[in-house]
Amino acid sequence: MRRMNINLGIIIILLVFSLISCVKPTEPKVNQPPILGIEYPANNAIDTHIDIRLVWNCNDPENDSLSYNVYFGLSSPPPLVSSFQSESIYYPGILVEATTYYWKILSLDDNGNETFGDIWQFTTGVGFIPDGMVFIQGGSFEMGDHFEEDGTDELPVHTVSLNNFFIDKYEVTQAEYEAIVGNNPANGSGVGDDYPVYNINWYNAVTYCNLKSQQEGLTTCYNLNNWSCDFNANGYRLPTEAEWEYTARGGVYWTDDLRYSGCHEESELVDYAWYISNSNNQTHPVGSLLPNQLNIYDMDGNVYEWCNDKHAYEYYSSSPSNNPTGPEFGVMRVVRGGSWSSDKNFCRVADRSFTTPSIGSQGGIRIVKSYP
C-alpha cells in the first residue's frame, strides 16, 4: 500500500509538471536564430539541372508564428528574396553549371528586427566540395606578364586551358600542418594556430599532401621515391603553376586583368596582401585581409606558396596549352605569390619565382584536389 501511494504521488507530480509545460508563454516572440538546412541538394551534391529546397526551423518551439527574411542569390551577401512565415522555400528547375549560391534565413522579432545569421553557400554542378576548399571552374586564360613589367621569365603571354579543380580557401595553417605531420616548423616570423605554416621545403609540402590524403582514405598523388605526381589520383597535391596563376587572377574572372590577386594598384595591395609595406616583417593569421574575386585569401604575400612544377625557362615558352604540369626535367621548383618580406613586384599574379626544393624558409602550402 505504501509503495502504491508513492507511485501515485509521482504520477500526480508528473501530470502537474506536464500541464505546466504545455501552457503557452505570454512573453513576446524572442529573436532566435533559425536552424538552417538544405533539404535538397544534400551534402552539396548537385546535378546541372536542379530543384533547390531550402528548409529551416526556429530553435524556440514556442514561437510558432515567427516571420522570416529569406536571402538567396548569386552574390555574397545575397539579396532579400521575400518575407514570410512558412519554413521552407522552393526554387524549381534552376539550370546551372558550376554556380555558387548564397543564402541566409533570419527570423524576425515583434519589432521586425532580424537575428544574426551566417551566410551559407553551396555550389551547383560540381559534386561534394572538400572541407576548406573552393571549387574552381576551369577555362582558358592568358598566362604571363600582361603589362611587360618583368623579364623574359614571364613571357610570352600564352593561352592555357585548365580543367575544373578544388583549391584551399586559405594557406595551410600551423595548426593544420602540426595535426597532420606532428610538428610545427614555423618560428621567428609569426607563430600561432591560425598563422600560415612556413619553413616548409618542397619535399615537406608534398609529404604533407600524401599524409593528409592517407588520413582521409584517399589515393596519394606523390611517389616519394622519385617525387613524381599522379594527377589522376583523388588525393591532395600542390597546384600546378598554371592552376595557381589562374586562381590568383580570379579564375573565370581573369579578364578583370588585375596586376595583383584581387586588386590592380599598389595603393590597394595593402588591403589584400601581407608584404614588406605592411607586414612588420612577419606573417599574419590567414584570411585577415580581403579575398580575391573567388573569395580566396592570401594569394599574394604572407608566405610563398609551393607549386608542383619544376622550373625551366624554355618550358614556359613552349608548354602545352592544355593543363600544363611543368617540365619533366629540372632542379628548381616554382614558388608563387611572394611572402611577408617581398616587395610589390613579387606579389604580382604573373611573377615567377623559384628555389631549390630543399630550401623553404619562407615557403608555405596551399593544396589542391583534382576534380573527379
Image: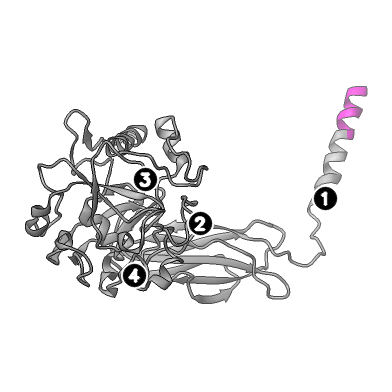
Mark 4 = which residue?
Answer: 94
Alpha-carbon neighbours of circle 1 within 10 Å: few (<14), some, or many (≥20)?
A: few
The label number, if any, that marks residue 362 in the structure image: 3
Mark 1 = which residue?
Answer: 19
The reply to whether dot 2 and dot 3 touch (C-beta < 8 Å) is no
Q: Which amino acid type corresponds to the residue marked 2 in the rendered image?
A: Gly
Dominant SS of magenta comes to: helix
**Which of the two discs, 2 and 3, sits closer to the camera?**
3
Q: Is residue 170 left or right of residue 337?
A: right
Alpha-carbon neighbours of circle 2 within 10 Å: few (<14), some, or many (≥20)?
A: some
Mark 2 = which residue?
Answer: 37
Q: Mark 4 to mark 2: distance in Å?
A: 19 Å
| Residue 372 makes an appearance in the image | no
| First in sequence: mark 1 vs mark 2 | 1
Residue 135: where, in percent of width, then height?
32, 57
SS at circle 1: helix
Q: How many marks?
A: 4
Residue 43: where, in percent of width, then height?
40, 51
Residue 194: where, in percent of width, then height?
50, 46
| First in sequence: mark 1 vs mark 3 | 1
Q: Mark 1 to mark 2: distance in Å?
A: 32 Å
Q: Mark 1 to mark 3: distance in Å?
A: 67 Å
Residue bounds of the magenta highlight: 1-9
